[in-house]
Amino acid sequence: MDQYEVAILGCGPAGLTAAIFTARANLKTIVIGLPDRSQAKLAMHIENYFGFPEGVDGPVLLEKGMAHAQKFGAVILKDEAVAATLVREGEKHAFVVKTAKGSAVHAMALIIATGIPIRSSGIANEDKLVGRGLHYCVSCDGPLYTNKPIAIIGNGDHAAEDAVEALSYTKDITIIANAPAFAFSETYQQEVQKWGIKTLAGKVAAFQGEKWFEAVQMTDGSSLPFKGVFMACGAAGALDFAANLGLQLKDNILVVDENNMTSMEGVFAAGNCAGRCREVAKNVGDGCNAAVNVIKFLRSRELYLDYAKGGHALAVVPPEGPAPLPAKKVRVGWFSFSCCEDSTIVFTEILNDYWDRWKDSIEIPYARALRSQNDMTNLDIAFVEGAIASERAAREVKEIRKNARILIAVGACAVTGMPSAQRNQFDEPKQREILPILRAFDYSKKVQPVHEVVPVDDQVPGCPMTEAGFLAVLRKHLAEAGIHAQF
């Protein structure tokens, strides 16, 4: 049986944040969860997360979170925790976590961060239309449907809560039970009636639409058109752990104190399973708070110290400030793949305006739009524009990744794949039609955003990127290198 000090159940923003803190504090940490089950994974674009003024795609944020946790030594087990039991009582509790694939993990403390797992409804075409008009997170994707008709699928309080939250964006909301009747609590029944939210009992047969969701087809044959649909069929996985461990619940939410500890010592909870607010920012804060208190709990300390890897408290910065870093120019490369290179044009315009201020701290050894001789070795930062549309491009971007300490995706195609990846959505006849062209030019069958080929450290979205967005990202990474640029 694998032995850990902390087992974190759930691989979303709350769980991964907790892992960053506990692993960095030199606690042996394992994260058990399926990233694809996180609601953040399915968020098309998150616009209200701190530090991303241009917004960030959910999958990108989640990948960064996993890489961040692994950087400090956290183990990520892509499996589903199905049971947790208390095996010993004493000064320190001990727990055994069992997984769907048969693994067993022993830990001295637990952080439950399972969120509200997405349960497949079994409705035809659900998987096909995810992210194409079908969503799982109102707070993430609700703004896409401002003043447009939407449907919410579910018959319990989860559906009612999503409907009330969606009122911030649209008043044209219909809750479809996908069941013979609704099972709202009295509180949510009153809320639904108070706001005039429409309800429809009955089973859903299928979601209609080829490339994008168009309508809900009921089993009675009727077809109900909506601009978007939100699934609220999940069941709180934390309920299973609550039953195993006898944890206190309120309205199917784990009850926690100000330290994010549940009713059992040594068991903490963070994120959606421990509160109604389903914002990524709130869940990250929960994960931090739970982790800090796990560290204090396991080390039997009243105070929390920020620990560097290795177990030693970080040194206090002297009054005169940190010692200056040795002078060194940051090596920057600019690379462009399949796109119109509009961000490259913006980049050259930025250089015209800022080069005099940069030349003492930045060198650009690779930029084919600017140089006849290029060198990609030992890059500090590589900016990559464009989607990856061929095996050759995939090999090249992997080589760039090997040579760059930081890789930043630039522009919509690099960040999301679109619009370059439109051919991924072609139906079978069109795919056959373009196949000779793909073969002639050595193109791949699928166009991919950069993060699907290599790990990405940051992004500058936009089509093209904006000057402000590029400068903000560059300024941040220069600061990490000890260069505080004034621009």
Image (cartoon, grey):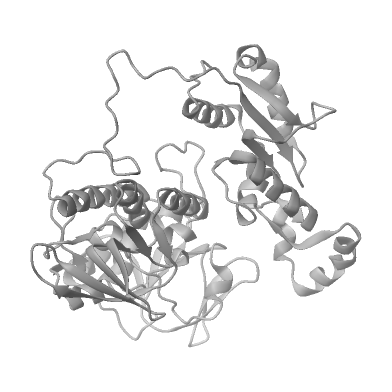
Residue drawn at x 70%, y 17% is 352
Q: Position of residue 187 (x, y in %)?
A: 18, 66
Q: Is residue 124 visible?
A: yes
Q: Position of residue 50 (x, y in %)?
A: 39, 39
Tell me the quadrant of the picture where the N terminus can be found.
bottom left
Residue drawn at x 43%, y 57% is 40
Of residue 72 and residue 179, the one placed in the foreground of this image is 72
Residue 244 against residue 397 in the figure, above or below: below
Q: Is residue 32 left or right of residue 334?
A: left
Of residue 104 and residue 150, the one placed in the foreground of this image is 104
Residue 176 against residue 375 in the figure, above or below: below
Number of callouts: 0
Q: Is residue 38 visible?
A: no
Q: Position of residue 310 (x, y in %)?
A: 33, 44
Q: Is residue 323 left or right of residue 405?
A: left
Q: Is residue 252 left or right of residue 456?
A: left
Of residue 146 and residue 281, the one placed in the foreground of this image is 281
Q: Position of residue 204 (x, y in %)?
A: 46, 81
Corner quadrant of residue 239:
bottom left
Corner quadrant of residue 133:
bottom right
Tell me the quadrant of the picture where the C terminus can be found.
top right
Residue sticking out furthest to the left: 90
